[in-house]
Image: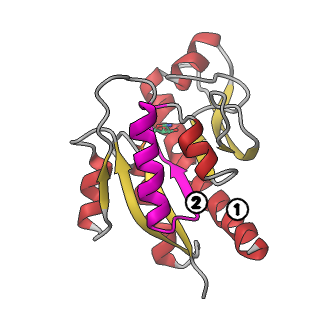
C-alpha cells in the first residue's frame, strides 16, 4: 500500500506527534513518519522520535526566535526534500515558516492550532479564549500559508469553556480534542493526496 511520507516539526513535548504515531500503528493513518525536526535540543518530541526509531533533525537557529534565517530554513527544506517527504506536519512548532519551506512544499504543510480559527490566532490561544470570556473554544487543523494561522481550514473540533476553567484546564481539554482531530484530518488529507498522485 502507498504510504505518505511525513515529516513532523515540533518545539515541545510532542503529545500530538504521539497521537499521530498511535493512529499510524493502529492502521488508521496510511503514512510513515520519516523524520522529526525540532528547533529545541531537549524537546520531548525528539526523545519520542528517537525511542520510536525515527530519524531526528536538529534545526540550528541562533539569530531569530519567531522564524528561521533563510539559510537555515533552506537547509531544512533541502533535508526534507532529500528524504522524499510528501507532507510536513507542524505539531507544536513555534516559528513562522517562510518562502524556503512554503515554496518547497506548496499546500503540503499542515498545522494544528489551539482555537477555533479564525478566532484567537497567535500565541496562547487558550488564554486568549479565557480572557475574551467565550463559552466555547477548540482546535483547528489548517494548511500553512505565508500568514499566521491563516491558511485553508481542513477541520475543527469544539470544546466547552467552563466557568471555573483556568488557562491550564482549558488547554488540557483542547489538547484532548487535538489528539482526536489531528490524526483524523491527516487521514482525510493524506487520502486526498494519494488519490491525486
Ligand atoms: C498544541 O496545543 C498545539 O495546538 C500548539 O502547540 C501545542 C503542542 O503540543 N500549536 P504538543 O507538543 O503536541 O504536546
The picture places residue 190, in percent across and down from the top left corner, at 66, 67
Residue visible at 58% across and 76% down? 30
In this rendering, the answer to whether 117 lies above or below 111 is above
Return the disc, 2 or 1, that comes first in the chain's sequence. Answer: 2
In this rendering, is residue 3 above or below 93?
below
Disc 2 to disc 1, C-alpha distance: 10 Å
Q: Which quadrant of the view contains residue 187?
A: bottom right
172 in relation to 16, above or below: above
Q: In the rendered image, which residue does mark 2 sit on?
A: 87
Q: Which residue is located at x 53 percent, y 52 percent?
A: 89
Quadrant of the drawing holding the C terminus: bottom right
- The span shown in magenta is 68-95
Instruction: State if disc 1 and disc 2 touch (CB < 8 Å).
Output: yes
Residue 56 x/y as whole percent: 30, 58
* Magenta highlight on residue 75: yes
Q: Nearer the viewer, residue 102 or 114?
A: 102
Label 1, secondary structure: give it: helix
Give the position of the N terminus as an image quadrant: bottom right
Query: What residue do we see at 45% from left, 76% from top?
Result: 25
Q: For the residue carrying disc 1, how many other residues have a C-alpha within 10 Å: few (<14), some (14-19), or many (20+)?
A: some
Amino acid at each position: 500500500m502507498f504510504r505518505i511520507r511525513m515529516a513532523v516539526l515540533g518545539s515541545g513535548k510532542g503529545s500530538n506527534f504521539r497521537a499521530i504515531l498511535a493512529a499510524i500503528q493502529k492502521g488508521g493513518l496510511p503514512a510513515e513518519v520519516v523524520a522529526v525536526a525540532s528547533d529545541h535540543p531537549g524537546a520531548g518530541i525528539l526523545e519520542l522520535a528517537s525511542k520510536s526509531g525515527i530519524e531526528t533533525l536538529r534545526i540550528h537557529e541562533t539569530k531569530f526566535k519567531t522564524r528561521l534565517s533563510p539559510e537555515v530554513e533552506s537547509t531544512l527544506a533541502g533535508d526534507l526534500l532529500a528524504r522524499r517527504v510528501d507532507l510536513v506536519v507542524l505539531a507544536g512548532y513555534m516559528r513562522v515558516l517562510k518562502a524556503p519551506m512554503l515554496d518547497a512544499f506548496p499546500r503540503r504543510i499542515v498545522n494544528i492550532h489551539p482555537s477555533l480559527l479564525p478566532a484567537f490566532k497567535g500565541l496562547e490561544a487558550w488564554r486568549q479564549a479565557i480572557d475574551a470570556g467565550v463559552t466555547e473554544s477548540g482546535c483547528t487543523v489548517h494548511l500553512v500559508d505565508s500568514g499566521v494561522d491563516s491558511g485553508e481550514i481542513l477541520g475543527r473540533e469544539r470544546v466547552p469553556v467552563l466557568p471555573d476553567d483556568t488557562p491550564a484546564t482549558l488547554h488540557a481539554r483542547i489538547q484532548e480534542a487535538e489528539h482526536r482531530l489531528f490524526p483524523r484530518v491527516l487521514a482525510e488529507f493524506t487520502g486526498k493526496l494519494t488519490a491525486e498522485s
